[in-house]
Image: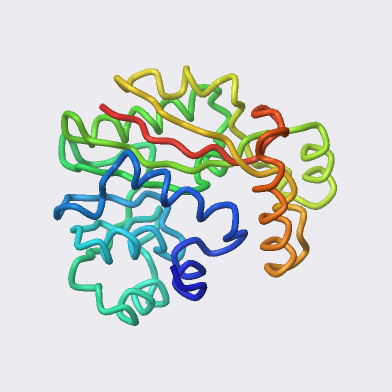
């Protein structure tokens, strides 16, 4: 994949987060036939772009309807005819048994209303919206290591409600099958995208020795 396309699909920390795409494709087969798809929390619309380039029909959604800049990116790649835009609240998705695929990246932590079960509620809304046998393709921030927690306290988003690896089974318990992996340790520490890419390459070298619970990204496919 060309670096400019990867940047438009993934956004930032592309070396690590782009590893979601081959993982999803190995389970989801998104490039085989036209499917009905929904992107939740589509800031920038990158995952909608990826799905539409694979000839799928996509609802690109955010809490507020995706803006003109998002739509312009899709027009640049001439896939906008496969995409429609909607404002959708992830806690109340207005569809049932509608989609073959639902996809999201880094949204669960930002939905933090004080309800300890909010992640379960959001994932259950996605479950409801999938057709029987449909798949949820996701990549999300994990709370990761003590080192990551300290860095986030100093430099990060203090109110982000990070997903704990120990809670994954509960959060996705409505699904019949869950496949996932965890990646990344150094990548998020880069101060610019070049540094994050270089550190992401280092992460690949250390995959075998970094404990799963210390990594900061979970990539998964949940099947209804």
184 versus 42 height, above or below: above
Taking the spot 19% from the left edge, 52% from the top edge, the residue there is: 32
Residue 42: quadrant of the picture: bottom left
12 versus 22 height, above or below: below
199 versus 127 height, above or below: below
Residue nearer the viewer, 44 or 31: 31
Scheme by which the image is coloured: rainbow
- Residue that protrudes farthest toward the bottom in the picture: 76
Q: Report the label total.
A: 0
Taking the spot 17% from the left edge, 50% from the top edge, the residue there is: 36
Residue 223: quadrant of the picture: top left
Q: Position of residue 2 (x, y in %)?
A: 46, 73
Residue 64: quadrant of the picture: bottom left
Q: Position of residue 132 (x, y in %)?
A: 16, 29
46 versus 95 height, above or below: below
Residue nearer the viewer, 184 or 70: 184
Residue 197 in the figure: left or right of residue 107: right
Q: Position of residue 180 (x, y in %)?
A: 47, 31
Taking the spot 44% from the left edge, 72% from the top edge, the residue there is: 5
Residue nearer the viewer, 177 or 74: 177
Quadrant containing the N terminus is: bottom left
Residue nearer the viewer, 156 or 159: 156
Taking the spot 39% from the left edge, 18% from the top edge, the residue there is: 173
Quadrant containing the C terminus is: top left
Q: Position of residue 202 (x, y in %)?
A: 72, 52
């Amino acid at each position: 994949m060309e670096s400019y396309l990867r940047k438009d699909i993934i956004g930032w920390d592309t070396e690590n987060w782009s590893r979601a795409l081959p993982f999803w494709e190995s389970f989801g087969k998104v490039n085989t036939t036209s499917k009905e798809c929904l992107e939740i929390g589509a800031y920038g619309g990158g995952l909608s772009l990826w799905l539409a380039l694979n000839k799928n029909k996509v609802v690109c959604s955010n809490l507020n309807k995706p803006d003109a800049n998002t739509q312009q990116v899709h027009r640049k790649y001439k896939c906008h005819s496969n995409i429609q835009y909607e404002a959708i609240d992830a806690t109340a998705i207005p569809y049932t048994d509608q989609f073959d695929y639902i996809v999201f990246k880094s949204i669960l932590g930002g939905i933090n209303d004080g309800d300890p079960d909010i992640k379960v509620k959001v994932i259950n809304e996605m479950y409801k919206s999938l057709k029987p046998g449909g798949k949820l393709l996701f990549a999300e921030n994990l709370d990761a290591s003590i080192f990551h927690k300290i860095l986030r306290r100093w430099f990060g988003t203090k109110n982000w409600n990070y997903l704990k690896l120990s809670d994954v089974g509960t959060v996705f318990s409505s699904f019949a099958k869950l496949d996932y992996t965890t990646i990344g340790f150094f990548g998020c520490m880069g101060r610019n995208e070049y540094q994050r890419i270089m550190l992401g390459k280092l992460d690949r070298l250390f995959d075998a020795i970094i404990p799963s619970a210390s990594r900061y990204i979970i990539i998964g496919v949940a099947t209804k």
